[in-house]
């Protein structure tokens, strides 16, 4: 219990209230004692003076012992808490009304007496208590004078021993006991209200802590939101609610982000395993075929005709080219991932680059029976990019379109200007791509399930194209539907100065 935040807050509140109660009680007792002393001294300020006047303590220059004895007797009967002392001019105690065994001082300091006789404005004024060294009490004093001068002082101590301690004050006063009880009852009510309030305030923290522990227990996989998501963006969410609400909202966002990252890591790990399997398969197939034909040539060199030897060598050369192309693509993708191939941006004509790529694929298009049509417009501005990397993008996209377009189909490469950009679109009339396959189209070694038969692609061309465009800050887009062909598009920024030559 004490290890929880609620327990610590409750213990802290109880300790604070106990300390507050003790301070208030001590202050109340001190204030009450000071008030009683002030009232008593003000009420009895002239007591000693009146006694001196009425009792005729001096008679023919001598001390009237009978009058003094009468004063002692009367005061002990009327008010036992008042004690009368007769002092000489130096403050020594000559006579007193207190029991002899209780008087412990032989003399009283006259400095407070002289201040009292000077009628100070601030009371109470405390003087020595002859019953104990170091104790001080309110008093009344008056000088005793004769024709010969000052004979001494009448020193009256106000307040007996019954209220010398706080415990005696509490025991002797019903009002003080009532006030102390009311103070304790008030502090108890505050403690109960504080515990209820702390319970209400920490309930959400407890719920958040339980949610965090449950999230951890599931391996950071399953998360149940603990905060209501306010409308608006991140700024609105930060402004909504108090710190606990914002903490819950932040935790929910963090948990969702962790779930997304863990899911992405799982998918990346799965893709990594698939990558290793695909690379192994795609490397093993041409290697096995290449090794088989070479072994056949070595074993049957004397029995094969020149035509068979040439056919075997052509097959081996084709698989060797495929193997070299695959290794080259893997190396190129690795360089792009490591950010070693940073774009060397320069202005160039996108129209001329499209014409060069189209001419490069023209023989392939004729052999496949596919029409390759560059669609260019005049007056297009030059673009800023790495011409070699963008040429690689065009080659990959056009080559991908050629592989997935059957004989009699058409591949079109078009350019258009839009809002300071030049948009490039590569459209084919091939088999198209299903909607559920579009999110994975740019993953490495991913190949569309209904790709054209005989496709020799390794599934790296689109991944390389996307990586290159990412380095240029451009996004590659795809539009496709089964039986309706596929369109890839991307945009490049316009060179601020100059136009490209007419196409």
Image (cartoon, rainbow, N blue to C red):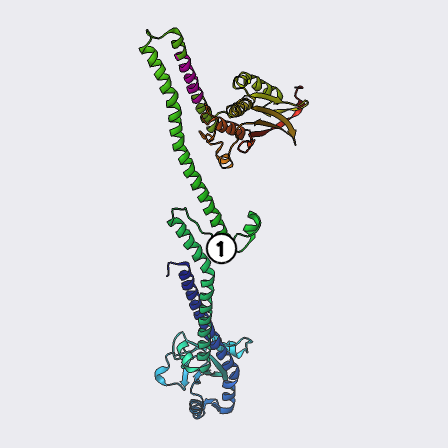
The percent coordinates of residue 11 (x first, y second) are 40, 63
The percent coordinates of residue 57 (x first, y second) are 47, 89
Q: In this view, does 319 lie above or below 258?
A: above
Point out the stretch of residues depicted in magenta.
Answer: 312-326
* Quadrant of the rendered image containing residue 310: top left
Q: Which of 130 and 124 is in front in this view?
A: 124
Element carrying mark 1: helix
Residue that appears at 55% across and 54% down: 240
Q: Which of 179 and 122 is in front in this view?
A: 179
Left or right, 420 with respect to 101, comes to right
- Label 1 sits on residue: 244
Q: In which quarter of the image is the C terminus?
A: top right
Q: In this view, does 150 lie above or below 290?
A: below
The secondary structure that dominates the magenta segment is helix
Residue that appears at 54% across and 50% down: 238
Left or right, 122 with respect to 88, comes to right
Q: In this view, does 365 lie above or below 175?
A: above
User: Residue farthest to the front?
Assistant: 408
Residue that appears at 39% across and 49% down: 216
The percent coordinates of residue 132 (x first, y second) are 38, 77
């Amino acid at each position: 219990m004490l290890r929880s935040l609620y327990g610590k807050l409750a213990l802290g509140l109880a300790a604070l209230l106990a300390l507050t109660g003790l301070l208030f009680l001590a202050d109340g007792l001190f204030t009450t004692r000071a008030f009683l002393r002030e009232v008593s001294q003000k009420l009895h300020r002239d007591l000693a003076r009146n006694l001196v006047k009425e009792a005729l303590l001096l008679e023919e220059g001598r001390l009237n012992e009978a009058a003094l004895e009468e004063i002692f007797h009367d005061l002990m009967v009327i008010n036992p808490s008042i004690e009368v002392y007769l002092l000489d001019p130096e403050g020594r105690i000559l006579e007193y009304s207190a029991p002899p065994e209780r008087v412990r001082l032989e003399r009283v300091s006259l400095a407070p007496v002289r201040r009292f006789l000077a009628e100070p404005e601030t009371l109470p004024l405390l003087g020595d208590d002859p019953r104990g060294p170091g104790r001080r009490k309110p008093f009344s004093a008056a000088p005793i004078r004769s024709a010969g001068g000052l004979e001494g002082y009448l020193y009256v101590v106000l307040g007996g021993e019954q209220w010398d301690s706080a415990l005696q004050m509490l025991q002797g006063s019903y009002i003080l006991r009532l006030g102390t009880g009311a103070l304790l009852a008030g502090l108890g009510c505050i403690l109960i209200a504080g515990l209820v309030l702390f319970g209400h305030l920490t309930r959400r923290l407890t719920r958040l802590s339980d949610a965090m522990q449950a999230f951890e227990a599931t391996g950071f996989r399953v998360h149940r939101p603990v905060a209501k998501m306010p409308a608006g963006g991140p700024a609105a969410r930060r402004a909504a609610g108090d710190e606990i609400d914002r903490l819950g909202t932040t935790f929910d966002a963090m948990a969702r982000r962790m779930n997304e990252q863990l899911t992405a890591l799982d998918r990346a790990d799965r893709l990594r395993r698939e990558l290793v399997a695909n690379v192994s398969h795609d490397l093993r197939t041409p290697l096995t075929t290449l090794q088989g034909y070479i072994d056949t040539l070595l074993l049957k060199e004397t029995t094969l005709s020149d035509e068979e030897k040439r056919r075997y060598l052509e097959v081996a050369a084709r698989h060797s080219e495929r193997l070299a192309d695959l290794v080259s693509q893997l190396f190129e993708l690795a360089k792009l991932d490591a950010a070693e191939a940073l774009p060397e941006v320069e202005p160039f004509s996108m129209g001329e680059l499209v014409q060069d790529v189209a001419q490069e694929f023209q023989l392939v298009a004729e052999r496949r029976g596919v029409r390759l049509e560059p669609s260019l417009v005049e007056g297009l501005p030059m673009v800023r990019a790495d011409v070699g990397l963008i040429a690689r993008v065009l080659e990959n996209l056009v080559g991908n379109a050629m592989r997935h377009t059957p004989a009699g189909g058409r591949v079109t490469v078009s350019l258009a200007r839009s809002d300071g950009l030049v948009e490039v679109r590569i459209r084919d009339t091939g088999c198209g791509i299903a909607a559920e396959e579009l999110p994975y189209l740019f993953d490495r070694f991913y190949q569309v399930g209904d790709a054209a038969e005989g496709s020799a692609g390794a599934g790296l061309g689109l991944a390389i194209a996307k990586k290159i465009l990412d380095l240029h800050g451009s996004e590659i887009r795809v539009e496709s539907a089964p039986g309706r062909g596929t369109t890839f598009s991307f945009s490049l920024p316009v060179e601020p100065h100059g136009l490209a030559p007419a196409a």
